[in-house]
Image (spheres, rainbow, N blue to C red):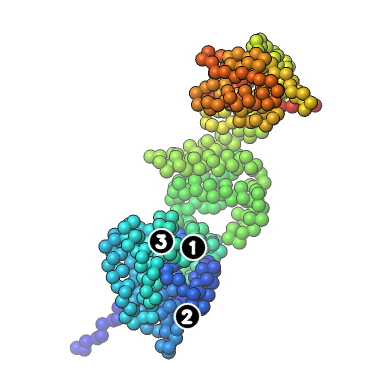
Amino acid sequence: MTDEPAPSPKAAYQVLARKYRPATFDDLVGQDTVVRTLTNAIASGRLAQAYMLTGVRGTGKTTTARLIARALNCIGADGTGNATASPCGVCEHCKSIAEDRHVDVLEMDAASRTGVDDIRELLDGVRYRPTSARTKIYIIDEVHMLSNQAFNALLKTLEEPPEHVKFIFATTEIRKVPVTVLSRCQRFDLRRISAEHLSGLFKEVANKEGAQIADDALALIARAADGSARDGLSILDQAISQSSSGDDTPTVDEAQVRDMLGLADRVQVFDLLDSVMRGDVKSGLDLLANQYASGADPLVVLQDLLELTHWLTRLKVAPDGADDALVAEAERTRGKDMAVALSMPVLTRTWQMLLKGLGEARTAPMPLQAVEMTLVRLAYAADLPTPEDAVKALGPQGGATAAADRPASPTPSPAPSAQASAPMTPTAASVVTPSGSAVAVSAPIPDVVLDAPPVVTADAPPPLASLADVVALCEVKRQATLAGQLIHTVHLVRFELGRIEIRPKEGTPQDVAGKLGAFLKEETGERWVVSISNEAGEPTLHEQEIAKASADPFVKSILDSFPGATIERVRAIEEQD
């Protein structure tokens, strides 16, 4: 009986993110500025003692650090080369650095070694020359995790390291790195990789792996990667594994990727938003139930609606955005139609309601119920008019209550020191509802404006017979701060020619009386005595305006329609012909 040789074990599978890690600077995707700067610096020998690489996950920070190490230590295929921006990849140093086993290229994970003792241990070897390489490289990943003491221990060596040492730091939280460290480094910001670059990269990788993947599926993976090549390659790896069957060529389509990622069908997202925008609650809830039954996460559905609303808003202001190559033709056509049909106020209101609903769903015990309630609110809000339409509907031309049909409001008797107001003054009032939104109301409201001052001419100062006259003079002379204090924070006690008594509210500047007296003397040429009194005095001008507006039946009807609403301000407007 002869012994047959044991079959060789199958080589261990290597994930795509590691298998297709860039081997040269040219392989870095979407980082043209960084590549150009580093390439020129290496070619000209203008090398810094330390580099700080920052960016979101998966953009190539650690890969760039290793490429710098290879570029500085490459000796070429013949062993006689110098530092180069195009490492050969075949020499001893290039291979050992790529395999993370070079004795002179030391990598440290600051997330697990954060203390000052770890840094001291690392710095103990700085004074020794490299064992075999040209330059000793220290790569510290997630450097922002180091303690303050560790950063301080690093400063002196980082500022004046030996000529044979280079430091390369990588971090996703650049704001957590002390400025004393940043000032000693050359900083490179690795950008999020665009969806177009990611789609091209994933298609190239899929072809090398012998897999067929639809363009729509590539676009989905690119969007899910969120600018990270590593995340996208991991998703692509999973998609290919899901579609593999025996020796057949794996085929990946959009539906498989959506099912794998738990995403709602894009067409169903359009249908869902269209239903709630039409106020069709039942259809909207049925579509959500179908997506939930198919495995879609309710939170992801809400995020898809947010993304679609944002995209439609961008189409509204920049229609050229519909020509994006990553957007399917059916989506472009339907998106253009919806962007035209939905007004900007409706889109912005939809965005705000979806954003609020997403926050509620994340904290709700039953996310599905929270999402359903958000859709119900959206559907019913679709029937609400915009603020502009509400003003038109409430006005005398389009409202249910015309000015002629409303009873005339009683005209309150003016205060002894006040002048009579016009019997009918066109006025705009801002009513704030309990939810915090403001409803502007424009209608002829009797006696809303208090103490209408006479017209001020440039030839002679106006007669001053009331505090309202003083306010009008302040506004004409552009004393806005003083006018605002007199309107909102000052109670009039007495007003006589040349003498004013006031009671300022708590928090009013103490020099308001002095400033008022100086202002009146300068403008009238006469001495005015402005004194502080402890008497209660009249309500402030602002409070009187609010009281008069609230007494009007028309405004009162609006306040009754919005329980808990308040009037914030009343202003006069010019009567239109």
Which of pointers 3 and 2 indicates the residue nearer the eye? 3
SS class, disc 1: strand
Q: Earlier in the sequence, mark 1 or mark 3?
A: 3
SS under mark 2:
loop
What type is the residue that disc 2 sits on?
Thr
- Residue 402: image location, x then y, percent: 71, 20
From the viewer's perspective, tell me whether residue 382 is left or right of residue 444: left
Three-letter amino acid code at the position of disc 1: Asp
Find out whether the residues at labels 3 and 2 contact each other: C-beta distance under 8 Å: no
Residue 189: numbered disc: 1
The answer to whether residue 376 is above or below residue 398 is below
Q: Residue at x 43, y 88 (%)?
A: 80
Q: Residue beneath label 3, please?
A: 181
Q: Position of residue 281 (x, y in %)?
A: 54, 37
Residue plotted at (45% across, 83% down): 82
Q: Which mark is residue 400?
A: none
Q: Which of these two is toward me, 359 or 125? A: 125
The image quarter containing residue 359 is top left
Q: Residue at x 70, y 29 (%)?
A: 476
Amino acid of disc 3: Val
Q: Is residue 391 above or below residue 451?
A: below
Image: 562 above or below 373: above
Q: Is residue 552 visible?
A: no
Check disc 2 and report the residue beneath it: 84
Residue at disc 3, secondary structure:
helix
